Amino acid sequence: MEAFTTHTGRAVPLRRSNVDTDQIIPAHWLKKVTRDGFEDGLFEAWRKDSEFVLNRPERQGATVLVAGPDFGTGSSREHAVWALQNYGFQAVISSRFADIFRGNSLKNGLLTVVLPQETVDALWELTEADPTAEITVDLEARKVLAEGIDADFELDENARWRLLNGLDDISLTLQNEADIAAYEAARPAFKPRTITA
Amino acid sequence: MGRTLAEKVWDDHVVRRAEGEPDLLFIDLHLLHEVTSPQAFDGLRQNGRQVRRLDLTIATEDHNTPTLDIDKPIADPVSRAQLETLRKNCAEFGVRLHPLGDVEQGVVHVVGPQLGLTQPGTTVVCGDSHTSTHGAFGALAFGIGTSQVEHVLATQTLPLARPKTMAITVDGELPEDVTAKDLILAIIAKIGTGGGQGYILEYRGSAIEKLSMEARMTICNMSIEAGARAGMIAPDETTFAYLKGRAHAPEGEDWDAAVAYWKTLKSDEDAVFDAEVVIDGPSLAPFVTWGTNPGQGAPLSANVPDPASYEDASERLAAEKALEYMGLTAGQPLRDIKVDTVFVGSCTNGRIEDLRNAASLLEGRKVADGVRMLVVPGSVRVALQAVEEGLDKVFKEAGAEWRHAGCSMCLGMNPDQLAPGERSASTSNRNFEGRQGKGGRTHLVSPQVAAATAVLGHLASPADLSDVATTAGV
C-alpha cells in the first residue's frame, strides 16, 4: 500500500447523500479481474449528464471528493475504492461513511475523512464559489485545511500508523503466527469443515 | 456485567488482543465467489502465499451465472473469463468449488446454510455485503472487501475493531399478511440506511422467535441496508432443527457438544446494548420501497411521500432525486404503481419457503398481461426441492419464467436486467439507481407482494387478490 502523509488538491463537491457503491462503480464493471482500469466506470450513469459536477471543465484534475452523508453504502465491492483512485482521487470527505467502504479505502491508501456536516457544507460553499480553491488533508496533524477552514478529524491511531507508513496488513498479521497456531490448536472438534483434511 | 450475543461470539474468536491494536479475529468459514476474489488470489501469487485453511474455505459461482442455457458456453466473454478465473484459482490453490452445473451451486448465502456449514457461534466472512444473512444462525457474519478476502485466505484471521451492539426488539405477533421482508423494510425505514453504522444488530423479541430460519435469514440479510455490517439472532430449537442432519452439521458426540455450546449463545439478561430500538409487531403492514435506497419505504397502503414534508435538507434532496429517477409523483397511491417486471429470487428471498409463499398465491391465477415474471431459485438444491413440490409447474402455468439458480436480476451482472425506464417489483435487497439494469426502477417487496403484484399488474398485497377468482375456484 502507498503511504499517505499529506495531500493538497482541488475538490469535487458532490451534493448527494447515500452515494452507494453501485453508483460509484456499476456492477457490469465488476467482471474485470484486475485492480486498475476502473476510472471510466466511476459514477458512470451520472457522468452521462454533461452538467454532472465531475464533467465540468473546472473540476478536471481535482483530487479531493467532498460528498454528502452515508457515502459508500451497499455492496462491499472494493472496486469502488479502486475506481476513485484510478480516476485520481486521493481523499474523500463526508460526514458519514459506510463501514465496509471505509475499511476498504483505508486498506488501499485512499484517505476517508469524517467531518461534521457543517464543515462539509462550508467546504461545498468554498469550492463551489471558487473551483480553484485547494483543500489540504494532513494525516500527520489530523487536520483538513482550506481557506477559512481549519478542522480536526479523528482516525484511530492504528489505522493512521499503517497509512502513514504504507504498511501491509497481511505481513503485520503473519508476525502473530504463534498466536494463530495456538488458537487453531484449541478450536473445538465440532466446528464445521468444508473438506476433510 | 453480562455480555450480548455478539460480544460472546466475538470474544470466543479473539486470537490476539493488545492495547492500541484492533482485535485479531479467527474466521471459521470463508465463502468465495467469482466477483470479489480474483484480485485476492493475484495478491497471494505475487507474495508467494498459500491458502492457510482450505478446510474452512469454499467457493461457488453466482453473480455472473446465466439463468438460461446453462449447458451452453456463457455468451458474455467477460463473464465467462471471470468464471474461468475462479475455476483456475480454485484448482491452483486447492479450494473446494461448486461451479455452474454442480448440484451444490447457487447464491453463496443460500449454499452455506443449506450445506450446514453456517453454524451458531461461528465467524463467517465473504467478499459480499449480504454475508450478514448467516447471522440468522447466531453466527457473526459480515461482508468484506477484496483486500480482506486476501487477508483471510493468507491468515484465516482479520484485524477488526469491535463494533457496538444494538438490540432491535420486535414484540407481539406479526399480522397474518406481514412477512420477514416487510418487517426488515420497516426497520430500515425507521432507523435509516446509516442507522446501524458501527453496530452489530441483534434481532430479538417474541415476533422474531416465532420466525422460521428462512425468514430469519431474510431479516439478517438486509442488516447491511441499515448500515450495519452484521445482524444476529440467538440460536434456538428452530435453528438446531434446521441444522440437524445437514451435510456439514456435527454428528454424534460432536452434535451434543455443539448444541451445549450453542445454547449458551444468547445475550445475558443483564447485558447492556449500546442502542435499543423497539418495533411493535402487530402495527406492521406489507411494506414496499418507493425510492432509490432501501430506507425510502412505506406501507403499501400509503402514498408516495412529498419531499417537502422532510425537515432534513439532505433527506429532502434525496427524496426529490429519488422521485425524479423513479418517475413518481408525490401523493400518488403506492398501489397505483404499475410494473413491467416481477423478480422473485436473490439471497434475500430465493429460498424454498419464499418460492412456496409466492407459488401459493399464483396457483390457479395468471400473471397479468404485459408483465414479465422471473422466478430464480437461490440454489440448485432449492430448485430441485421446488420441482419435487411442483412449484415450478405452478409458476409456469401462471405465465412466469422458471429459471436456473443464481443472483440474476438482483444486480444484473448476467443477462437478466431491466431496460431503461422499466419498473420492477423485486424480492431482492437493493433499489439503487440502475441496480437491476441501467435506468431500471426497482420497488423492493416480499415474495407475497411480488406474486400479488404479478397477478394484478400494479403493487398489491395478497389481500388485494381476494377479488381475483382462481381457476381452482378458491
Image (cartoon, coloured by chain):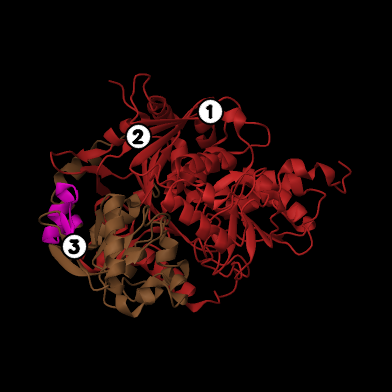
Direction from residue A54 to residue B402 in the image, left or right: right
Q: Residues within 10 Å of mark 3 (few under 14, many from 20)?
A: some
Check residue A146 in the rendering and tell me which mark sits there, or answer none. Answer: 3
Up-down relation of residue A40 to residue B228 (above or below): below
Residue type beneath disc 1: Glu
Residue contact at pointers 3 and 1, CB within 8 angstroms: no
Residue type beneath disc 2: Thr
Badge 3 and badge 2 in a common chain: no
Earlier in the chain: of badge 2 and badge 1, it is 2
Up-down relation of residue A105 to residue B70 (above or below): above
Q: Residues within 10 Å of mark 2 (few under 14, many from 20)?
A: many
Of tags 3 and 1, which is closer to the observer? 3
Up-down relation of residue B104 to residue A26 (above or below): above
Asked whether residue B338 is in view, the answer is yes
Looking at the rendering, which quadrant does residue A145 occupy? bottom left
Query: A88 and A55: which one is in front?
Result: A55
Direction from residue B393 to residue B126 in the image, left or right: left
Residue at (28, 67) in percent of width and height: A127
| Quadrant showing the C terminus of chain B | top right
